[in-house]
Every structure is written in structure tokens, then in C-alpha cells.
Image (tube, rainbow, N blue to C red):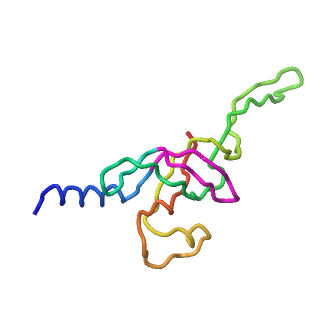
Amino acid sequence: MDMNFFYRLINNAVINVHTAYIAKVISIDGSYAVVQPLTYTKDAGGNAIKQAPVAAFVPANVKYAVKNITYRVSETSTETIDVLVPSDLKKDDIVYCGVCESDISSAVKGIMTELPVRHHNINDSVILRVL
């Protein structure tokens, strides 16, 4: 047997176990965003190919903005502080996505999921942070 065959077989399997990636937000629709992974993958021949956009779950308050807030301390003085305030995810944001161990379609609704049919699938992505 050709050892390169086994190397390619193992390498291909490892590449297809998705864990996390950086992506660009293409669009947002409710609690899901379509994101474009910013990494290439390889086809069976070892050629680099652009990954297809995927839908990623958007948890509440995944993005924050820093705002200066001035408030009145007394009748004669004010104070300004920086505060983190929830902000909306928007097109072109760069995000860090995690890939769940199994199908998340029920879990994101708070429903216990059955034993996974699929695992580490890029379609079970969750936006963890805006970079």
C-alpha cells in the first residue's frame, strides 16, 4: 500500500473535524447569521478551495460597544466613565465561531438533543465573539 494514500486519508479526516474558525458576517436574520469562513480547505486532490458560507447561531449580546457616559455625581460635579453596552451584530463584522460537538438545532431552543447523528459539523457553528 502507498503510505501517501494513508497520510492523505488521515489528513483529510482531520481537516474535516471542525472546531473553530474566523469568519466575516455576510448577513443577519434573527438569531442566525450567514458567515464566510476566512480560511481555505482542501479538495480530494489537495488543492485549496474557498469554503462555502454557513449559518451560525448568534447568542444574545454577543457584541458590545464601549460608550462614554457622563453622569451627575452632585449638584456641582459630573463624572465620565466607559461602559460596555450591548450592540447589534452587523454585516462585515469579523467573528470567532465555535463548532459544537453535535447538531444544535434543538439545543438552541433549550430542548435536550438526542444522540448526535453528526458531529463537529461546520453547520453547527455558534458566534462566540466579535473581533
Magenta segment: does it hold 22?
Answer: yes
Residue located 57% across and 73% down the image: 106
Image coordinates of residue 97 in percent, x first then y, are 51, 51
| Residue 32 drawn in magenta | yes
Furthest-right residue in this view: 75
- Image quarter where the N terminus lies is bottom left
Give the x, y percent position of residue 69.
77, 31
Q: Closer to the camera, 9 or 85?
A: 9
Residue 121 left/right relative to 82: left
Q: Which segment is the magenta one?
A: 21-38
Residue at the (75%, 25%) spot, across then down: 80
Using the image, determine if residue 35 lies above or below residue 71. below
Q: Quadrant of residue 10?
A: bottom left
Where's residue 41, x and y in %?
A: 39, 50
Q: Which residue corresponds to the image point at 55% horizontal and 46% vertical from the top-left? A: 129
- Left or right relative to 78: residue 28: left
